Amino acid sequence: MLYGADYNPDQWPEDVWDDDVRLMQEAGVNIVSLGIFAWSRIQPAEDVWDFGWLDTVIGKLHAGGIRVNLATATASPPPWVSARYPETLPADETGASYWPGSRQHFAPSSPTYRRLAGELVRRLADRYVHHPAVVMWHVGNEYGCHLWMDFSDSARDAYRAWLANRYATIESLNEAWGTNFWSQRYGSFDEVFPPRLAPYSHNPSSMLDFRRFTSDMLLECYLAEREILLAAGATQPITTNFMGPFKPADYRRWAPHMDVIADDCYPDPANPHRVRDAAFQRDLVRSLKPGVPWLLWEQATDAVNWRPANAGKRPGALMAETAQSIARGADGIMFFQWRQSRAGSEKFHSAMLPHAGTRTHTWDAVTELGARLAALPALPPPGRDARVALVFDWENWWAVEERDHPTEIDYLALMLDWYGAFHERNIQVDMVAPEDVDNDYALVVAPLLYLLRDEGAASLARFVEAGGTLLAGPFSDVVDAHDQFRSGGFLTQLGPLLGVRFEDFGALAGASGGGMGVGAQTSSSASTTASVDFSLDGAAHAGRLVAESVHAVDAEVVARFTSGHAAGSPALTRRRHGAGEAWYVATQPLGDGLNAVVGAVVAASGVRPVVAELPTGVEAARRGDLVTLINHGDQDALITMAGTDAETGAPLGRRILGPQQVAFVLSPVVLDTDTSPDDQRALAPASSL
C-alpha cells in the first residue's frame, strides 16, 4: 500500500529537508509526489537550469527509503514564459487573456507552450529516468481544473485543424452541424472560430465538438509528455491525476493511456450526502480501468481552503474515507500535501504535517493511518464484483446540459440520485459507457441517455437479448452523435426494445438548477422543481423534470401517471425481450418513488447486496474476497459476520463498530443479524478499530 503526499521542498529552506524525511518515516510515508509546481525553480530563466537542489532532495528521500513519483512540473509555467511568449496564454470567451499570477495559465493547444514543456520534460527524463528512487512519473497536474475551455488564437488554429481531421471536408462539417439553420453555413474551415461570446445560443453541435476538442487538447499535452518519457527509456508507470466526475475531460477516452488511474477526491464534511458522493467518485475511477487497482493521489487530512466555508473532518473520518477508497479498489493513499504551506493561495489547506506541528490531532491521525495501512496484508485486485452498471457518458453529459432543451438538466446530480438508491442498499455499481455494457452485469441502469450513439444502442439491445435487465430513463435516445434528431422521431433505437412509442416530452414547470460547477458535488437534485404523481404497487409517488407521453405498444404497464396532462398514460413499463427484459420510466422519480423503481428492477434482476441487512449508516463494499465495513453513522453498529479480520487474522464474529470505525473482512459470510439488546450490551467495542 502506497502512502504519502505531494512534497514541495522548494517552498522551504534546505535545513528542514532532513526533518521532513525523518518525520515521513515516523508517519509511515513510503512515497511522495515531487516537484509538481517546481518549473520556476528548475528553470528560473529560459537558458538557466538548476537541478542541484532536486538532486539533493531525491538523494535524501532515497536514503530514507522513500520512493519518488516524479512530476514533469509543467502544470504552472514560470513568469518568464508568458513575458517572453504571450502567445502561450489562454483566453476567455471574449478573447481576453488569462494572465499569470495563479496556475494553469497556458493554452493547451499552444505550440510554444508544448515546445517549452517538452524541453523541461526531456531534461528531467534524461537526468532521472534511471534513478532508483523514481518509481513513477506524474505528468502535468489536474488537467483543465481551472481552465475549462480556452478560446485563444492558439485554440482557434488547433480547432480548425482538429475539425479538418475529423470531417475532412467543410461540406461534411456543415452536414454534421446543421449549419443551414440561422445562416451558419461555412465556406471553409478558416471561417470557423471557437464558440466565443455571441448574442445568443451557439450551435449545439458545434458546442459538442468544441468540448470534444477541449478534452482532446488536454489529452494531447499529457500524451506528448508521456512520449518524451518513454523515448528517454522510462519503464516506470506514467499517469496524471483525475478529478472524479470532471466535466471538461472525457476520462474514459484518457484511461487507456494511463498505466494506472490516479484520482483526487475531496468530500465536503458539510455535505450530508458526502458518503454517497465520494463512493460514486471512487466507483467511477475504478470503472475506468477494470481489474486494475487505482491510486488516491490527493485527499485532505482536515479542512481545505477553497470552499465558501471550510469545515474540518470529524474524528475518525480520515480512516473512514480512506477505507472507502481501499474498499473500492485503491492501492495507494496520498494527500495534498506533506508540509502545510506558509504562503500562497493554499496556505490554509490542511496537510499531513500542519503548522502546529506533531502535537496535533492531525498528526496523530496520519501516523495512526500510516501504521494501519502498513499492517494490511496484500489486497486482492478489484475484480468484476459489481453486477449493476450505471451508464455514465461524458458526451451525453456535454450534450444534455446545453441550452434550449425542454427542461434544464443537472446530469451529475441526477446520476448521483440513481447511484444513491443502490448505495443505500449496499449494492455495488460500476459506471460504464453504453458501448461497454456486457453480460457480466445482471442489471444496467441508463437514466437520461439523451445522446445515444449507434454502437451504444446495439450494445444495450444485445445485453437484454442475452438475459440482462435494462432500465432506461426519460429524455433518452433523442439525438445522435452530432446532437441531431434521427429520422422517425424519438426512441427510434430503443423503442422497439422497450415496447413503447414516444409522443411528447411533457416538460414540467421549473428546472433542476443551472448545472453544477465542474467537479463539484451536490446534496440533492430535487430542488423546488414541479412534480407529477404516479402510482406503483398501490403507493403514490412523485416524479420531476418530465412526464413523457408514451404509449405501450407491446410492453406491460407497471405504473401510470395519476396527475397532470399525462394522467392515465404509462409511467413505468416492462417488456420481455429475448432472454432478458427492458424497463422504461417516463419521469425522473423522486425520493420514495426512485427507491420503489430501483427496488422493482433489483427484484426482477436478482441482484443482491454486498451484505444484507446492515445497520443504518454502515457501508459495505466488496473487492475480491475482501469486504470492507464502514460505520458512517453517529451510533455504534453491531456487525455479525463470519470471516477473518484482515488486520489481526482473528475471526470477526460479532463486532461493534463505533462511529467512523472500519473493519476489513476476508472471506466473509453473513450470519444472523438479529441480536437482542442484552447481547448487544455484552459486546464491547473493538478498541483496535
Image (cartoon, rainbow, N blue to C red):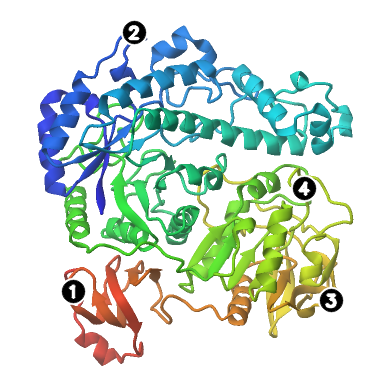
Residue 244 position within the rendered picture, expressed as x and y whole percent measured from the top left: 47, 48
The residue that mark 3 highlights is: 568
Q: CA distance from mark 3 to mark 2?
A: 75 Å
- Asked whether disc 4 touches disc 3, contact meaning CB atoms under 8 Å apart, the reply is no
Q: Residues within 10 Å of mark 1 (few under 14, many from 20)?
A: few
Q: Is residue 379 left or right of residue 310?
A: left
> Residue 47, labelled with which disc?
2
Mark 4 or mark 1, earlier in chain: 4
Q: CA distance from mark 3 to mark 1?
A: 59 Å
The residue that mark 1 highlights is: 649
Q: Is residue 503 left or right of residue 119?
A: right
> Residue 303, labelled with which disc?
none
Above or below residue 326? Residue 500 is: below
Element on which disc 1 rests: loop
Under mark 2, the amino acid is Asp
Mark 4 or mark 3, earlier in chain: 4
- Asked whether disc 1 touches disc 2, contact meaning CB atoms under 8 Å apart, the reply is no
Residue 656 position within the rendered picture, expressed as x and y whole percent measured from the top left: 26, 78
The residue that mark 4 highlights is: 405
Q: Residues within 10 Å of mark 4 (few under 14, many from 20)?
A: few
Locate the C terminus and report the quarter of the image it occupies.
bottom left
In front of the other: 274 or 395: 395
Residue, x 54% and y 42% (percent of image)? 518
- Asked whether disc 4 touches disc 1, contact meaning CB atoms under 8 Å apart, the reply is no
Q: CA distance from mark 4 to mark 3?
A: 25 Å
Element on which disc 2 rests: loop
In front of the other: 60 or 421: 60
Q: CA distance from mark 1 to mark 2?
A: 58 Å
Locate the N terminus and report the quarter of the image it occupies.
bottom left
- Asked whether disc 4 touches disc 2, contact meaning CB atoms under 8 Å apart, the reply is no
